[in-house]
Amino acid sequence: MIVGVRAVRVSIPFRRPFATAAGTWHQREAWIVRLYAADGRVGSGEACLDPGASPSALEALAAAVRAHVVDGDEPVDLALVGAIEAARLDLGLATLGGPEAAAGSVAVNATIATEDPAESLAAALLAAEDGYATIKLKGGRERSTTELVARLTAIRDAVGPDVAIRLDVNGAWDLATARARLAGLVALGLEYVEQPIPAGDIAALSSLGADSGVPIAADESVVSATAARELVEAGAVAVLVVKPDRVGGPLAALSIAREAAAAGVGVTISTLLDTGVGLAAAQRVAARLPGGAHGLATGDVLTNDLLATPLTVHGGRMDVPPAGPLALDEAAVDRFAIETVARGERQVRRDRGDPTGARR
């Protein structure tokens, strides 16, 4: 069925610097993996790391992609495994199983990256006016508990009690700071605080939720199915933020989500600020889960999402891409490409518009 594979390394600027407690990011690097079927169809998947990944981590992923695409090595890197799986799903060579949500769309949260009090308040009001029922704020760089509570109180008062508020700290607080911050936030009725302390200490996460009364979500801690299971079995968190890129692809993400839901743990499907290719795969996972807003309304943080028809949000919801291969904006893929590798090259070139398969 598969006669060629092509991987394009792209670097796409953010529309504006994306600031978090873990750093400020200016561009997004990813690999777009294309599988070419004998009937001419092309399936697409995305392999990427956290936007703040080190140069050595990015090069390790690049080496894994080259080894698979050029040499035919079995993929072991989770990001690459997930990209290949997403491309196979895109071609209909694999299935997530189970019905999609009847609505054909998924609820999403608005992500507000700025921590400036006036800017975040204005953005939260605009999101609520646009129909978002859930808002995700960034935290972790505030100088004091008083400053944080004042900012979130102003937002809560402005958007009212019916808009859910999430706070994402990206692991920026130490345990003592987390306890102080959470104590100050109890009265605001937050849906959850995401990754208040660095990943790796399940017992500390458990104690924060139990002692503060504020629901805790794990994000950076969810690096694999095993890590997710350990969090669930320990009763450490109320919510898992599951990112297909990070855990090995859509099937792995869906399995984690279903196992967590069966144990009474909530699930938010999100990405690593992917292009539209990765977002579409994550949407297809989210569409098979009941309720809740997912962290997928991020396509417009990049200057281009690489899709022929960009993903959009209407009234706080995103339509799930229809079955069948995604239509990419091939000119945009070429414009942002910084490296390309291929196997079954003659067929790949022919499918890209050169009937002779000759080198160009």
Image: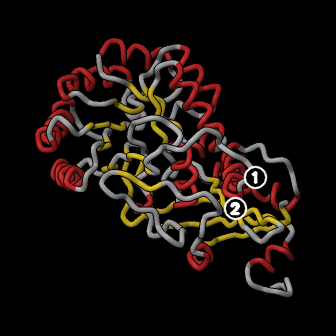
- Look at the image and tell me whether residue 52 can be seen: no
Above or below 211: residue 267: below
Reading the image, the residue beneath label 1 is 93
In the rendered structure, are the residues bearing label 1 and label 2 in contact, judged by CB atoms less than 8 Å apart?
yes
Badge 2 is on which residue?
43
Left or right of 324: which side holds 25? left
**Numbered tag placed on residue 274 in the rendering:** none
Q: Nearer the viewer, residue 138 or 164?
A: 164
Q: Position of 112 compared to 87: left or right?
A: left
At x 27%, y 44%, the residue is: 133
Mark closest to the chain's N terminus, 1 or 2? 2
Q: Residue reaching furthest front?
A: 102
Q: Where does residue 254 sit, x and y in percent of width and height? A: 59, 36
Where is residue 307? Give x, y as percent: 54, 68
**Residue at 81% in and 80% down:** 350
Residue pictured at 30% horizontal, 22% vertical: 214
Q: Nearer the viewer, residue 19 or 100?
A: 100
* Disc 1 from disc 2: Cα separation: 10 Å
Split into 4 quadrants, where in the image is the C terminus?
A: bottom right
**Amino acid marked by disc 1:** Leu
